[in-house]
Image: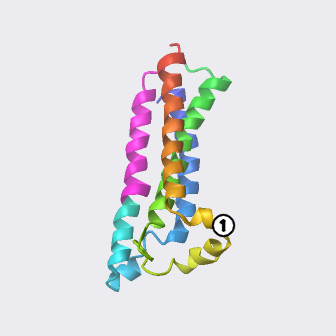
Amino acid sequence: MNNAQTLFSFLFAIYFAVTIAYSGKFQPFDTPSIYAKDWRALLRLVVSFLWLNILPILYYVFVMNELSGITNFSFGFWPILALLMFSLAGFGFYRIFFGMMLWKSGKDFIFYGKELPKTFESEWDLRPKAHKNWKAHLIPGLFWVFATVGYGLIWLNFFYKP
């Protein structure tokens, strides 16, 4: 592993751990409810596993492959900012996940039914009305992922000098 991959791995691990910690309020892996035959809990588990576990691993492998050709990494502001931006994409994944969990069909939440989990309900009541639209989280999350990954790729492909 080269220096860029090592630094990216360190930063990615921090943000990945924070994302997983914040996702708990959505009860993404609610196996007791699955055992009680709650199909929404099973759907939530599948989506959460794919979005919070598999997607970050695929993204990590992608970035590690992109960084594999770096032979002379300089610890300057711009190179470190590029690696930071690559690692911050995880927050975009979380924001998209947040939006997906708030997705509604009519008056019911797709992943919960009529009510959000108690672990999130009190926080939800304190939020302004604009925050209660699932698109207000999903669309900025997509933008965040494209912006952070785009910045890292631009640095890597146009400004990195081996």
Asked if residue 61 is among those painted magenta in the image, a careful observer would answer yes
What's the amino acid at mark 1? Pro
Q: Is residue 27 above or below residue 9?
A: below
SS type, badge 1: loop
Magenta stretch bounds: 50-72
Residue at 40% across, 56% down: 51
Image location (x, y in percent) of residue 57: 40, 47
Tell me the residue at 31%/84% (across/down).
Answer: 37
Q: Residue 55: where, in percent of width, then height? A: 39, 50
**Residue 109 drawn at (x, y percent):** 44, 73
Q: Which residue is mark 1?
A: 128
In the displayed structure, 141 sits above or below 97; it is above
| Residue 80 spot, x, y in % from top left | 62, 29
Relative side of 143 to 48, left or right:
right
Q: Quadrant of residue 159?
A: top right
From the image, give the main secondary structure of the stretch colored magenta. Answer: helix
Q: In the figure, 145 relative to 16: above or below?
A: above
